[in-house]
Image (cartoon, grey):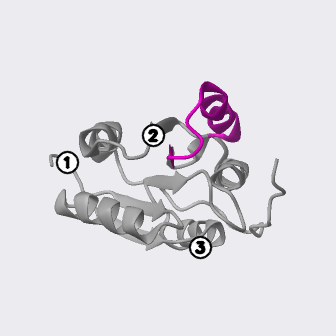
């Protein structure tokens, strides 16, 4: 890895996916915060101000799409890099919905580690993200 270590939130209700991605990303020198639910992702993002959020679209409670919409509501154009991952919703419509929700990128599971690392690489040469003003509370966003 060249550049600085990134702060990354990896969210998926499939623990094996989170464990695998966390191991790959940590091996590259990044700080990884593993979480297993949509509410967990929102809480962790508020706590650590990550450079990027990698989140499964299909999670119980709050979907990845709702997570992305909420992060865009909070951060606006200054949101962390949002990367959707999905093994279930992989059609063109699903990719379009993820883009409309605010994701910057979409990867199909299982994704090649090199594809994920390539998306993260430009962030390592940038300054760390400043903490946003969280005077507004994070609220539950209704599903589509």
From the image, state whether disc 2 or disc 1 is nearer to you.
2
**Image height of 114 relative to 53, above or below:** above
The residue tagged 1 is: 3
The residue tagged 3 is: 40
- Magenta-highlighted residues: 84-102
Q: Position of residue 85 (x, y in %)?
A: 49, 47
- Examine the structure image and report whether residue 89 is included in the region drawn in magenta: yes
Q: Position of residue 12 (x, y in %)?
A: 51, 63
**Image height of 35 relative to 68, above or below:** below
Q: Quadrant of residue 22?
A: bottom left
Labelled pair 1, 3 in contact (Cβ < 8 Å) = no
Q: Position of residue 124 (x, y in %)?
A: 28, 46
Circle 2 — which element? strand
First of labels 1, 3 by sequence position: 1
From the image, state whether disc 3 or disc 2 is nearer to you.
2
**Image height of 142 relative to 41, above or below:** above
Image mark for residue 108: 2
- Residue 65 located left or right of residue 142: left
How many angstroms separate mark 2 from mark 1 (CA)?
27 Å
**Image height of 52 relative to 139, above or below:** above
Q: Residues within 10 Å of mark 1 (few under 14, many from 20)?
A: few
Q: Residues within 10 Å of mark 3 (few under 14, many from 20)?
A: some
First of labels 3, 2 by sequence position: 3
Q: Quadrant of residue 128?
A: bottom left
């Amino acid at each position: 890895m060249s550049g600085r270590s990134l702060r990354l939130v990896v969210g998926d209700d499939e623990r094996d996916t989170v464990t695998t991605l966390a191991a790959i990303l940590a091996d590259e020198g990044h700080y990884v915060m593993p979480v297993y639910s949509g509410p967990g992702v929102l809480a962790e993002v508020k706590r650590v101000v990550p450079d990027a959020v990698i989140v499964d679209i299909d999670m119980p409670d709050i979907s990845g799409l709702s997570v992305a919409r909420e992060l865009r509501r909070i951060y606006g154009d200054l949101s962390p890099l949002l990367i959707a991952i999905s093994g279930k919703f992989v059609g063109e419509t699903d990719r379009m919905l993820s883009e409309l929700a605010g994701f910057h990128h979409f990867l199909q599971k299982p994704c090649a580690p090199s594809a994920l690392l390539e998306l993260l690489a430009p962030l390592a040469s940038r300054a760390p993200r400043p903490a946003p003003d969280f005077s507004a509370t994070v609220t539950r966003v209704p599903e589509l």
